[in-house]
Image (cartoon, rainbow, N blue to C red):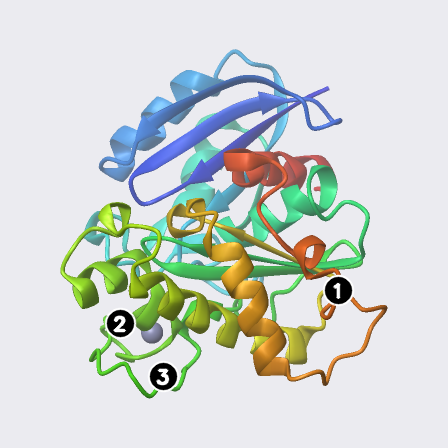
Amino acid sequence: MRFGAIEAGGTKFVLAVGTKDGEILEKTSIPTEHPDTTIEKIYEFFKNKNISSIGLGCFGPIDLDKDSKTYGYITMTTKEEWKFFDIVSALKEKLSVPIFLDTDVNAAVLGEAQFGSAKDVKSALYLTIGTGIGGGYVVDGNLLHGMMHPEMGHIYLQRRFDDDFEGHCSYHKTCFEGLASGPAIESRWKQSSKDLPKGHPAWDLEAYYIGLALSKYILILSPEKIILGGGVMSQKHLFPMIHKYVQEILAGYIHSDHIISEEIEDFIVSPGLGDESGIKGALALAILG
Ligand code: ZN
């Protein structure tokens, strides 16, 4: 049996066909254009592939409430053409297969839980830190939804004493995303994060804010694994600094088999699937139904 997978992002859509074991047989990527154009290209890719269903990990916010009139809609996105677009119905109509929808970050954490860094634990948190910041959480195979879905990038963080940056989030100014996303780094330091050298103070401050946010998630969700992906996290030198700040901020309070004190390198990690967490997670959405 073959399954379809779609990782829908603000700049591109990744499309794949895979097996129930998580093997990707075929994969392509298309730019995010007008919804009509994009849906047509998705149809062209999947039309003769004989897939039984499609898992869709989608940028948001999206409506995941099955009792809602707008279930399956992308809602208040900043991408005007996609605002209140019913992506689930559009795909169902074209391809006549069941569509299993979740957020891009929930798909990513599911991918890591099924096939990647978190396959040996029961609970895991995935955060993407790039153009925006978002998080997905899985426990005992179940993705966390609730009222809509978590928006972990927008928790309020206290600015560090030596930081007077006004913040970059248009809703909250100095939330996590407003202080630590790629655009926030660039706006604070007036240069692209890719051009900032390793020893630049930007990275210590970045690690501090990530460490501060992770400490809150650890206290609230108690994940057994934290996976950090996204463009900013391709700066691998951030990891040891984040580990140090998480230990400092938690101040020895969490005792669990020395995970925080001695095994933190195995607790806060890079995606085991590299840049395939999202697409393999979308595949897992289709497989698990
Ligand atoms: Zn915000």
List the residue tagged with mark 2: 169
Secondary structure of the residue carrying numbered label 2: loop
Q: Nearer the viewer, residue 268 or 157?
A: 268
Seen at 43% across and 58% down, the residue is 62
List the residue tagged with mark 3: 160
Earlier residue among tags 3 and 1: 3
C-alpha distance separating marks 3 and 2: 17 Å
Earlier residue among tags 1 and 2: 2
List the residue tagged with mark 1: 262
Residue 198 badge: none
- Give residue 282's position: percent from left, percent from top: 58, 39
Task: Determine whether, in the image, residue 74 is placed left or right of residue 229.
Answer: left
What type is the residue that disc 3 sits on? Arg
* Mark 3 neighbour density, 10 Å: few (under 14) some (14–19) many (20 or more): few
Secondary structure of the residue carrying numbered label 1: loop
Seen at 21% across and 78% down, the residue is 165
**Up/down of 123 relative to 54, above or below:** below
- The quarter of the image holding the N terminus is top right
- Disc 2: residue Cβ within 8 A of ligand 1's nearest atom: yes
* Mark 2 neighbour density, 10 Å: few (under 14) some (14–19) many (20 or more): some
Label 3 or label 1, whichever lies nearer to me, is 1
- Give residue 100's position: percent from left, percent from top: 59, 43
Residue 248 position by quadrant: bottom right
- Give residue 103's position: percent from left, percent from top: 51, 53
